[in-house]
Image: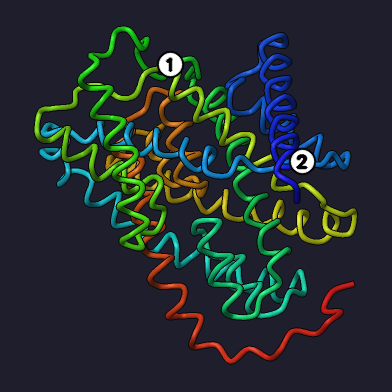
């Protein structure tokens, strides 16, 4: 595609996302910088508008959240780690239950082939599951739409639960004004974001754009060099591009894909949502986690999306992200091992009606 066309598509996508922010502000709807772009781009995608992803800029925005998480890991937090042990230990059986329920759902109820069913059921990162699914011979378009739907539904549903069942607002300041953050710390954040990201890519780190900056920012925080998370404007920019990315993933979706893939993903979200609520209830009832943190820790969204929701809910960011990082690690290590135990037949060309 010509360079001008690509840039024009990106400019159009940003304009649509910005319109979504404006509409959400006018209607006083929650989380305008995240949900506004998400639903505006989703609507445009369903109407057939040709949009473009943000490329490196969009990925780079995720580094801001990695730095925010790393800055939240303080020496004081380390003293609390033993108290997290029981809640964190629930992550492994949680992933196992989702897999045991999800695979038969996609395979027997929805009629997907084996590889697609297995990797659609895994609550891992979007890109990782698509890559693993491709190696196993899965239907990549279906897999991508199912995981995109999982993230979209979770990002939409969790704020509703927070507002209506936890008596919690979603207007916690995402960060300080940029002028209130010491310039030296801003410089360290930039170093953590860029060096951590590129270093993570070179090392083959999964989720390098988040985990690389998180690791380096954690080192700065524990070294008493970093005492603030990124300024509010940076967090809002990250929300904007994450919301845009989720909505734009539906570009080119057909009515058949809506009827089969997106509907399957939406129904599966109900199933895993109930699993998440059950495990969150266990953690909260046993006193292993505060109720809000328990919900955010077990909601099976992406790392970036759950970090954003945790920040705007004013919850314990390091506590929540610890659970999500472990979930992703368990899936990335365990899914390929378990997947190799299956002897899947080649998928039929017309596997679904």
Dot placed on the residue nearer the N-terminal end, 2 or 1: 2
x 61%, y 34%: residue: 243
Q: Secondary structure at mark 1?
A: loop
Q: Position of residue 162 (x, y in %)?
A: 52, 27
- How far across and how far down the image is residue 66, in percent? 35, 39
Q: Which residue is located at x 38 percent, y 52 percent? A: 208
User: Compared to 76, does 51 lie above or below?
Assistant: below
Residue 72 is labelled as none
Residue 5: which disc? 2
Q: Nearer the viewer, residue 125 or 51?
A: 51
Q: Based on the displayed image, in which of its 4 quarters is residue 321 positioned?
A: top left
Quarter the C terminus occupies: bottom right
- Which residue is rendered at x = 66% and y = 75% of the image? 138
Query: Is label 2 in contact with label 1 (beta carbons under 8 Å)?
Result: no
Q: Which residue is under mark 1?
A: 172
Where residue 11 sits in the image (x, y, percent)?
A: 70, 30
Q: Quadrant of residue 314?
A: top left
Q: Residues within 10 Å of mark 2 (few under 14, many from 20)?
A: few
CA–CA distance in space, label 2 to label 1: 39 Å
């Amino acid at each position: 595609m010509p360079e001008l066309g690509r840039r024009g598509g990106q400019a159009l996508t940003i304009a649509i996302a910005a319109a979504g922010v404006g509409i959400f502000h006018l209607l006083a709807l929650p989380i305008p910088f995240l949900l506004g772009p998400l639903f505006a781009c989703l609507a445009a995608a369903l109407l057939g508008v040709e949009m473009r992803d943000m490329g490196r800029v969009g990925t780079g925005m995720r580094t801001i959240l990695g730095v925010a998480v790393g800055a939240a890991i303080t020496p004081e937090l380390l003293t609390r780690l033993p108290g997290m042990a029981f809640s964190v230990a629930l992550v492994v059986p949680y992933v196992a239950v989702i897999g045991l329920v999800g695979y038969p759902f996609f395979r027997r109820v929805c009629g997907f082939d084996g590889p697609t069913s297995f990797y659609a059921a895994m609550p891992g990162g979007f890109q990782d599951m698509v890559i693993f699914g491709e190696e196993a011979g899965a239907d990549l378009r279906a897999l991508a739409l199912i995981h995109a739907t999982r993230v979209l539904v979770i990002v939409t549903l969790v704020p509703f639960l927070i507002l209506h069942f936890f008596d919690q607002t979603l207007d916690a300041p995402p960060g300080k004004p940029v002028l209130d953050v010491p310039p030296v710390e801003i410089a360290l954040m930039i170093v953590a974001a860029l060096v951590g990201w590129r270093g993570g890519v070179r090392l083959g780190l999964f989720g390098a754009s988040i985990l690389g900056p998180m690791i380096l920012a954690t080192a700065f925080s524990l070294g008493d060099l970093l005492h603030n998370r990124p300024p509010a404007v940076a967090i809002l920019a990250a929300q904007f591009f994450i919301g845009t990315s989720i909505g734009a993933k539906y570009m080119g979706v057909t009515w058949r894909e809506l009827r089969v893939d997106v509907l399957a993903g939406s129904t599966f979200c109900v199933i895993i949502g109930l699993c998440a609520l059950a495990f969150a209830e266990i953690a909260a009832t046993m006193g292993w986690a505060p109720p809000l943190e328990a919900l955010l820790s077990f909601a099976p969204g992406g790392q970036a999306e759950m970090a954003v929701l945790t920040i705007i809910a004013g919850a314990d960011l390091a506590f929540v992200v610890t659970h999500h990082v472990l979930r992703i690690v368990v899936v990335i290590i365990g899914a390929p091992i378990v997947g190799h135990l299956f002897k899947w037949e080649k998928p039929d060309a017309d596997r679904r009606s």
